Amino acid sequence: MKKEDKVLNIEKLGNLLNDYAHFYVTDIAGLDAEKTSSLRRMCFGKEVKLVMVKNNLFRKALEKKGVDYAQIADAFKGTSAIMFCNTGNVPAKLIKEVNGKDEIVKLKAAYVEECFYGADSLETLVAVKSKNELIADVIALLQSPAKNVISALQSGQNTIHGVLKTLGERAE
């Protein structure tokens, strides 16, 4: 590969690092052409960008961005495919879905919510809630007491109405 091509690839990877908040370093060498194509379609459908990279070029892109990747340096060996995304847990769920019982797509490392994760962290990454999921949980927690008060008031209204109706019928 010519030096100009390498520089262009490093710039493209740097742009992807700027555009996406999270990335997963995976090994998809065990997939045949049909399964790779299927994985790419699944990634596209879930707004995940799957890119095959040369390890050295990706390391240089990380260095250029100023990311200290020492914790996951061992992940940059062999064949690497990077999954870029803006929702931290989507690639982990996708990997788990694709793998099923077999470990076809191997997680090497991940950078999610400004933390590095190793190859053994797939279950943890699946459980990580996205920003939108956390906001929904907080809203649900805030709404719960108000719903309980409204429910109590409405049931109290029915109870009072029932008592008055019974008393009214008894007086006759």
Image: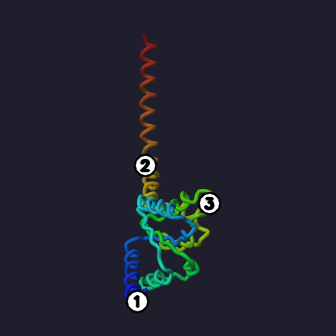
Residue 71, position in %: x, y?
Answer: 56, 80
Give 167 or 135, whichever is nearer the viewer.
135
Q: Residue at x 42, y 22 (%)?
A: 164
Query: Which residue is disc 3 drawn over?
Result: 102
Q: Which mark's residue is nearer the viewer, 2 or 3?
A: 3
Label 2, secondary structure: give it.
helix
Query: Which residue is disc 1 drawn over?
Result: 3
Query: Horizontally, is 71 left or right of 20 in the view?
Result: right
Q: Which picture quadrant has residue 105?
A: bottom right
Assess disc 2: are there few (<14), some (14-19) or many (≥20) residues with their C-alpha within 10 Å of its C-alpha: few
Image quadrant holding the C terminus, namely top left
Assess disc 3: are there few (<14), some (14-19) or many (≥20) residues with their C-alpha within 10 Å of its C-alpha: few
Give 116 or 158, whichever is nearer the viewer.
116
Query: Horizontally, is 34 left or right of 103 in the view?
Result: left
Query: Which residue is disc 2 drawn over?
Result: 143
Q: Which is more N-terminal, label 3 or label 2? A: 3
Query: Horizontally, is 96 left or right of 38 in the view?
Result: right
Q: Which is more N-terminal, label 2 or label 1? A: 1
Residue 120, position in %: x, y?
Answer: 62, 69
Q: Amino acid at mark 2?
A: Gln
C-alpha gap between disc 3 and disc 1: 39 Å
C-alpha gap between disc 2 and disc 3: 42 Å
Q: Residue at x 48, y 61 (%)?
A: 39
Q: Amino acid at mark 3?
A: Asp
Label 3, secondary structure: give it.
loop
